[in-house]
Amino acid sequence: MADYEIADLSLADAGRNKINWNEGDMPVLLGIRERFRKERPLKGLRISVCLHITAKTAALMRTLAAGGAEVVLVASNPLSTQDDVAASLVMHDEIPVYGVRGESLDTFRSHINVALDVKPHVLCDDGADLTSALLQRGLNAGVMPMGATEETTAGVKRFKAMEAQGVLPFPVIAVNQSLTKHMFDNRYGTGQSAIDGIIRATNLLLAGRTIVVAGYGWCGRGVAARAAGLGALVVVTEVDPVKALEAAMDGYRVMPMLDAVRIADIIVAVTGNRTVVGPEHLAELKDGCVLANAGHFNVEVDVAALEALAVRIEQPRTHVTSYVHADGRKFHLLGEGRLVNLVAGEGHPPAVMDMSFANQALASEMLARNASTMAKIVHTLPQSFDTMIASIKLQAMGIRYDVLTTEQDTYLHSWQEGT
């Protein structure tokens, strides 16, 4: 059996059932797995994967292993691990897994180091945590990975910062930038799973309540649309005037956060930035307001400021921490300020992760074949990958679509014909 550090190996059968259920809605990734099993494009590679340990991630791990890779999986968040899935990967797939739901930050960091200690050829990163740890440890040319892939918007920003500072040690493929990833995963995945996590954590009726969505990127668009669909009154806060204008034209009220907190029943931060709800906002926060993060790291809500203001802290529900202010106001933080969709829910539906992880698998293959000739910058996957993934997805959904005729294609690529 593979080495591991997980919660309970006896959960393996329950985890296998969960993985199999999710794979039933992941036809694109399973198609890639079948090809990988025949071609073995990753044979001889060690791939260290730092992602949320969920049933969807398990499907990716099985696919990379089918391609011939030696894979190791570590958690990308201390509170997102599904312990039964971790057990199944160890027991049934003999994949080394290091992750326990609720693990301490010290344990989390030790698992990151385990993923680097195996001297991986490829890093599959989430939030650039593996690569950041590698840079902080000090680079050793003898164990330098050939490249990395990145799953998230927040991680791409960190990798771009490394590139700008000239410290990016290898080529990185920004999987998040593929249209079949961020347009669907971030919008439909985060939109549904964030709302699902909030409802699971609180059992609140959203209809008629004012929900403030901080950030109107693809994730914010999704959360706003799903909240509005459930009858909520949606307010958007933004720092980008173009996105603020878009939100207004989509029918939402737009205002500064300092004004929004006075009317907010629920605040969902999806900016990828820090202190979106800070001390100045907490001073004006409406009594009973629920605070949730669906961005990335647990810095969007200033938890330290919440604790400093509180005269009493309560735990009324499993994923709810209530902070009682000296003036009697009470604020409710979900999932300790970490990703509410993964702490209180199961994360994105498999139908969207199917496309995201198809991109991940193809990115690993691209590095395996081409890393030695790729510049040490942040790359994107070819547009042809998006077209292929979307076509397979439509076919699996039973949806037919038109194709250009030869005449139409010729016209679109000519300049002679005009008015």
Image: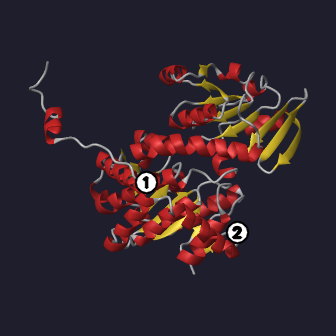
Q: Is residue 140 visible?
A: no
Which quadrant of the view contains residue 81? bottom right
User: What separation in Å lies between label 2 and label 1 (alpha carbons)?
Assistant: 28 Å
Which quadrant of the view contains residue 88? bottom right
The image quadrant where one finds the N terminus is bottom right
**Mark number displayed over residue 100:** none
Could you tell me residue 286's position as x and y percent? 79, 25
The kind of residue tagged 2 is Ala
Which residue is located at x 59 percent, y 55 percent? 76
Between discs 2 and 1, the one toward the N terminus:
2
The image quadrant where one finds the C terminus is top left
Q: Nearer the viewer, mark 2 or mark 1?
A: 2
Which quadrant of the view contains residue 43? bottom left
Q: Which residue position holds label 1?
A: 149
Q: Is residue 304 left or right of residue 138?
A: right
Q: Are marks 2 and 1 in contact (CB under 8 Å)?
A: no
Crowd around label 2: few <14 · some 14–19 · many ≥20 (10 Å): some
From the viewer's perspective, is residue 117 above or below residue 190?
A: below
Q: Secondary structure at mark 2?
A: loop
Which residue is located at x 34 percent, y 51 percent? 391
Q: Which residue position holds label 2?
A: 7
Could you tell me residue 362's position as x and y percent? 37, 58
Q: Is residue 120 visible?
A: yes
